[in-house]
Amino acid sequence: MPISKKQKFLNIFKIGSIQLSIVLIILFILESLSFLVLSFKKGFKDTLLYHPLAWKIYISRTESGSPINLGNFSPLSQERYQPNSSYGPLTINDCGFIGNTSIREKDCSKILKSQNYFKVFLLGGSSAAGAGVNSNEETISAILENKLLKRYPLKKIKVINFGAGASYTYRQSQIIKSEIINYYPDIIMSFDGFNDAWYWQYQHNFQNFKLKNNKPIPNWADYSYKNYLFNLGFQNKRGNYLLPYLFRISRKISSQFNSKNDPWKYSPEYILSRDIYSSPKIAARYFYNNIASMALLSTFSNKNVCFFQILQGDVHNKLNMTEEERKNLENWKDKISLKYRDFKKETHQSKMLSMYEAYSKILFQDPYDLKKELKGRYKSLDYRNLMNEKGAGSTNYIDNIHTNFEGNKIIAQQMLEDILQSNCL
């Protein structure tokens, strides 16, 4: 008996439905596997929010109610934070910096623009920002502000925390130029050293970056440049609505075979870094030039501004670590070994200490005679041995560089003493 047209259509529809179901099941399995792989590398939340629908749902529940489309930093200097967000457990106010109280400061813009406050700006990386403590009140800037207010109760004093995770001297020179000199600063304190040395020693070997000949990068940070590319339209922070994780994995695989997809070819610093030799002496020259830029920008903007350069130390500078600090350091080294191909536990200490020593030496030599030319408005301070002198017997570090509340109190007290010994207050 011949098959009717209707039956043929039903048979074709049935076979097609089965084939389509198989394809959809395979795509679902591949998408799920892609999600798991990305979650393992990027974390569950970040991977989930790569889907634009998940991102919209997440954003609709946030305080701002609108998508964050400029990354975590200012598009100009890659240094400031998204207003009314957070940095770990720390609250970021509506001006884009970490306030000195957990309650968001709503008058921060007025204070920045006011000439009625004595303003101290603190610059630096995550240590200055407050990584290592659980509340804004435990940061270096908050402690320093309280100490200054207690000493001068009738004076309007504000310590403004412009510290940012991953920041280093070059980026700080840009934010001084673009913003701080317009906010009537009285003292600018740069708490630096670690990130500059770290990028020089390791950043060119971070994860799968393959810079030619593994040369150091003098003025660069990983996600600073990623945000730069994103703002230019070279990178999309969100995926497609359909199969975003599978497409992301596919693009990552294809980029390994197609050099045209390599974003590093757009980076002038990638090209320049090929000609730089891995020498602490050359690294120190870059570091000092950045410091000089900051000092000159600060003091030339206002004849009353003082600039303090503070060379920070890390836990390796502490001669008598506590047992807790030793464990913290080992745990940190184990984690870092997974991210940096060139990181070796046995050589890390000597590498970093040699960089610190080169930095200290050139700051002491002061090739541009900043101390003389700026007549007391420039101070170069060395805090490498601070924890040996004032933190002996106590745990001050939670890893290799970040200090806890006790460590922050020691640093803030030393900053206070250095300010009082100057003619800047």
Image (cartoon, grey):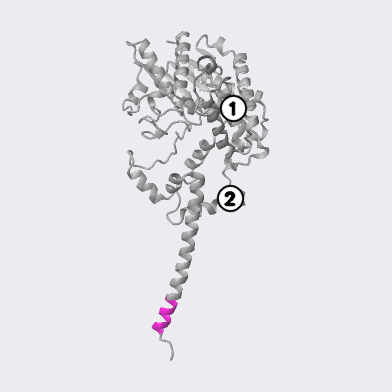
Question: What label does residue 119 carry, if any?
Answer: none
**Outermost bottom residue:** 1
Q: Residue at x 45, y 34 (%)?
A: 73
Pointer 1: what residue? Answer: 197
Of the numbered discs 2 and 1, the one sitting upstream in the chain is 1
Residue type for callout 2: Ser
Pointer 2: what residue? Answer: 255
Residue type for callout 1: Ala
Q: Residues within 10 Å of mark 2 (few under 14, many from 20)?
A: some
Residue 6 among magenta residues = yes
Q: Residue at x 54, y 15 (%)?
A: 380
- Estimate the x, y position of residue 65 in percent, counting from the top left: 33, 41
Q: Tell me the chief SS of the magenta region.
A: helix
Depth check: 166 or 295 in front?
A: 166
Q: Residue at x 35, y 48 (%)?
A: 57
Which quadrant: the C terminus?
Answer: top left
Residue 337 sits in quarter: top right
The span picked out in magenta is 5-13
Which quadrant: the N terminus?
Answer: bottom left
Camera sees residue 59: yes
Depth check: 196 or 338 in front?
A: 338
